[in-house]
Every structure is written in C-alpha cells, then in structure tokens.
Amino acid sequence: MSVNRPDDKTLRICLAGDWMLGSDIPQAGVITGEIGAGPRIERVTFCTDSLGGWDTGLLTFLVKVLNYCSGDGIVADRNGLPGGVQRLLTLASAPPGMKGARREPARISVLEWFGGAALGFWRGLLEMTEFIGEAAVAFVRFITGRARFRRSDLFVTIQQCGAQALPIVSLISVLVGLILAFIGAIQLRLFGAQIYVASLVGIGMVRALAAIMTGIIMSGRTGASFAAQLGTMQVNEEIDALKTFGISPMEFLVLPRMIALFLMMPLLSLYADLMGVLGGFVIGVTMLDLNFTAYYNKTAESVSINDFLVGIFSAAVFGVLVALSGCMRGMQCGRSASAVGKATTSAVVTGIVSIVVAMAVITVICHVLNI
Amino acid sequence: MEKPQPHIVVQDLTLAYGDSVVQRDLTFTVGRGDIFIIMGGSGCGKSTLLRGMVGLQRPARGRVLYDGVSFWDAEEVVQQRIMRNFGVLYQSGALWSSMTLAENVALPLEEYTGLSAGQISEIVSFKLSLVGLAGFEEYYPSELSGGMKKRAGLARAMALDPEVLFFDEPSAGLDPVSARMMDRLILELRNSLGATIVVVTHELASIFAIGQNSVFLDGATKTMIAGGNPRELLTSSADPRVRNFLTRGEAAAAS
C-alpha cells in the first residue's frame, strides 16, 4: 500500500498485492494517521490497479477508513475500488431491518449487579415454592388415584434409577466403608481398640453416609438426567404439546420420576449400608486381624434400629429432593441448547446443596428428639 | 358468499414477555370453518400470538373468545374443555420422543375417550395413513425425517377430531412438493371435517393457496396493519409494507 497526495486537499490510497485475512495487512491507523499528519484533507480516493486477491480483510480495513472519513467530514470517493468491493460495502452500510435492534454491550455497576442478583434469588425462591406446591398437588392427586401418567413410564424410570444405579452405588459405598475403616483403624489402634472400627463403620454408614453418598450419586446421575430430559422436551415444544392436550406435565412427567426416586432411594441406601459395612470388614480382617464373627457381632451390637431408620428416612427425603431439583430445573429450562446445559448443572448443584442442608436439619432434629 | 359464524374472536390482545411488548392491540375474528392466516415477517410475533391463542402464554391484556367464552378469564375446568377441542401442530412436530408414533397419536385418545385398545389402534393406523405414514406405527420420532415428523405431528393433532386446528409454520423446512401436499391436506381437513384452521406462516405460496382470511402483523410498529383475504390484499392493499411482503419485495423494487 502506498499513500500520496496528488494535490493539497486529496489523499490517494493505492492498494497493491493480496489483501487476504491472515496475510500481513496494514492497519487502518496508518491511513488515519496520514490524514491527520498533513494539511486539511477534503477528499480520499482509491486506486487499485495492482490489487491482487482480496477478501473480508480488505473490507474491514476499508470500513474503518470510510467510517473515519465520514466522521471527519471527508468525502470518500469509492469509484476507484473494484465493483464487488463497492457493492458489498453498500450492502453492509444498509440500515438495519429492525429499529432498535442494535444493542450496546451492557455495563453494569456493582450495586446494580447485587440488586439484580438479590431480585433473581427472590424470584428463584418464589418459583421453587410454586413448583413444590404444584408437585404436592400432583402427589395428592396420585394418592387419590386421579393423576394421569403412564404406568410404563414409572417402571422404566424405576429401572433406570434403581437397578441400573447398583454398580456405581456398590463401588462408591465399598470405597467409603474402606476409607472410613482405614482412617479409624490408624487412630483406634493407638488405644488397642481396633474392634471399634466395626462400630465406627457400621454407625457411620447406616445412619448417615450411605444415604448421603447415594443421594449425591443419584443427584449427579439421575437428577442431571431428569433435568436434561425435561429441558430437551421444553426446547422441542414437547411440554407445550402436552399442555395443549390438557395433560398436566406435573403429573405426566414429574410425578413418575418423583415416585420412582422416592421408592428407589431407600432401597439403594439399604444396599449401600451393606456394601459400606463390607468395605469396613475387608480392612478389619486384613489390616487389623479381627476375626469374622467378632466384627459381625460388634457391628450388630452397635448399630441400633434407630440408626437404621434415620438412614432410610433420610434416603427417602433425599430421593424426593433430588427428583424435585432435577425436574424443577428441567421444567424451568429456556429454549436453547445452552439452557439445557445450564439446567443440568443447576439441577446437580441444587440437588447436592439441598441434600446437605436436609441432612443438617435431620441431624439437629434427631439430636433434639434424642433419637 | 355467506358470512361464516364467528368461531374465535380476538379483542385488543397485547402480548408481551415481561416488559417487552411483542404485539399490541390485535383485534380480529376467525369464522367457523375458515382457513385463517397469521402472517408477517420473521420475528414479528406470529408464534407468540399463536401461543396466546392456544392457551400457552397468558396475554398481557385483551381477550380471546371461543364461541363467546373468554379463554383467559375462564376457570381452569372450562379452559381444559376448550383446549380439548384444539389440535396444534408445532413447528418441529413436537412429538414425544420417548414414545413411538402409534403411542404419540394414541395418548390423547387414551386420555379422553373410553375406547378399547383395539379401537384406538385402528384409529391410530387410520390417522397415520391419512398423513401418508401408514406402517410407521412402531417408529420413534428420532428415526424420522423432519417432514415425516411434521406429518406425524399432524396425525396427533387430528387424533381427537378437533374443532380448531392450529398450525405453526406447517411448510417451513419442507421441500416444495411436501409443502404443497401439506397445503392440500389442510384444505381437505377443512372441507371434510369442517374444522376451523389457523395457520401461522410466511410462505407466500401457501398463503395464496389456502388463505381465506388473514391478519398481517408488523414487527416494527408491533401491531396488525392489515387483514382480510390475502388475494384481495394483494390487489387492493395500499400499504407498501403489505404489498412488499405479498410480492416478495418486488413492489418495493418496482417503485
């Protein structure tokens, strides 16, 4: 590129060679600097006789130059440019189809951000309350036998969140039992009280850990899948289609999922109890040289029926929480692919947070009631 | 021609998402047995209007009356009863993806009729063959092409022999021959079932082929700027925006 001044008031920009994206294209600043440097310019002309290939790289350069010229009251004579370039520039400068379509990137002050977040949080709470209310109504209709959903859906969901979750639940619970026993063993051995590893693992797993671990697994596994399923149905207008047929999505979609998890979570948690104790047993026998009967007897002696019931009750509560948070995020999902992703993430986060909070509440209540 | 009885009356309808108004002050009447077109450029709020009419989105203001009953002021039981007379074909078909075509079409029948399983499966096969999908009963929606999904969606919309059929962009994404087949199907449904049909579209060929009455929504002014028979609008409308739309922009190019 070369720039010259045929007379005092005119700037001639000569473009030569290939102007392609990725090749070494001069910055528009060179031109604007040139315009500012000499005496006042009133016209800009172009000559492109030796211009080779060109693409968007040339166009964006020219748009910058032309915008600068029009902002500075300089006449830009486009006649020297190739025909195709002129036509594309005219197209690009056409007024937008919709008034007010152009958006400035929003700048938000910290205060505004906090206000928005607080309002959003409040709206979220309202929506959550509404959803829980609707779910409760659907559940009452189920109890009274008036809810409409497909039995086969319920069984498929039960299978998905019950039997098919067994492998992962086994793995995690055995490992948690193992870890618990291992940590306990190191400390208890100092006092020669190795046998109490059985109590530690038994009570820990049965009363709390089995339910919590199963809840977290199911939140990541099933809660996320509920949110993704319902979210995709929302995107695909399938939920709208249900509504226009007068079928309540709460009964048809949410209810079977809720019931399935409510039924399966206690069973999975029971299974996790066994697996956790098994994990502890492995450590007890191999590391601490306890014999089988002693370990069994100690476990049976220290785990009370109350521990067991608290664990099963917690698991049922977690089941409802995981199902609710998964379904809620799915039903609230927006109408795009990224919204489904957000819904899934949010379902898992809501699920895990609500599990931990619920566990805290249950523990406090049990403490007060002396259970 | 005898003026048809009004079936759907829309009065002063304003549709909005939160604070942003999509369309305001819409007033029009859809006659019984009419094929009514809602047209306008992309993004002008046609589908939103449809959502307001089929009971999916509460309008910010105004009323939608079905046979004189205001839908959004009615109790839920009444709303449900009115909605039972609707058939809606969604843009992408919106088939329930976890069910086969037969189960999709059968679900409304199972919900609302006391028919036996045998009768239902006969009806399902008949409805599917009406839309040219005989033999596809056991297919899942994901195994079908876009056009087939749309036709299956239509079979489902017709399941309960509805009084009003709503179509959201019925020919969008279809090849010209399938699009024309869809138009013929819509005409046939009106003629044989006497259904009132509301079509959201911007396909000119369909608009002129099937439209008897219409409303034209403008995205810039956010309201309706014309209404009536589309063919008459083409010859008589003085509004350049309407003429421009109905002639694919040639009116503007000529002037």
Image (cartoon, rainbow, N blue to C red):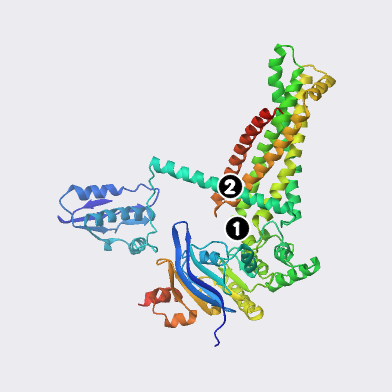
Q: Which mark is residue B244?
A: none
- Depth check, front residue: A235 or A328: A328
Q: Quadrant of residue B225?
A: bottom left
- Depth check, front residue: A36 or A148: A148
Mark 1 secondary-structure assignment? loop
| Residue found 51% across the figure and 47% down from its top | A123
Q: Earlier in the sequence, mark 1 or mark 2?
A: 2
Q: Residues within 10 Å of mark 2 (few under 14, many from 20)?
A: few
In the image, is A218 to the left or to the right of B215? right
Q: Which mark is residue A129?
A: 2
Query: Disc 2 marks which amino acid?
Result: Thr
- Depth check, front residue: B93 or B226: B226
**In this picture, is A72 found above or below A214?**
below
- Res. B94 in view: no
The subunit letter for the residue under badge 2 reads A
Residue position marked by numbered label 1 in the rendering: A236
| Residue found 47% across the figure and 61% down from its top | B16
Query: Disc 1 marks which amino acid?
Result: Asn
Q: Are marks 1 and 2 in contact (CB under 8 Å)?
A: no
Q: Quadrant of the C terminus of chain A?
A: top right
Q: Position of residue B87 (x, y in %)?
A: 63, 69
Q: Quadrant of residue A163?
A: top right
Q: Nearer the viewer, mark 1 or mark 2?
A: 2
**In this picture, is A171 found above or below A162?**
above
- Depth check, front residue: B216 or A248: A248
Q: Position of residue B149 (x, y in %)?
A: 64, 64
Mark 2 secondary-structure assignment? helix
In the image, is A305 to the left or to the right of A118? right
The subunit letter for the residue under badge 1 reads A
Residue found farthest to the top: A191
- Whether discs 1 and 2 lie on one chain: the answer is yes
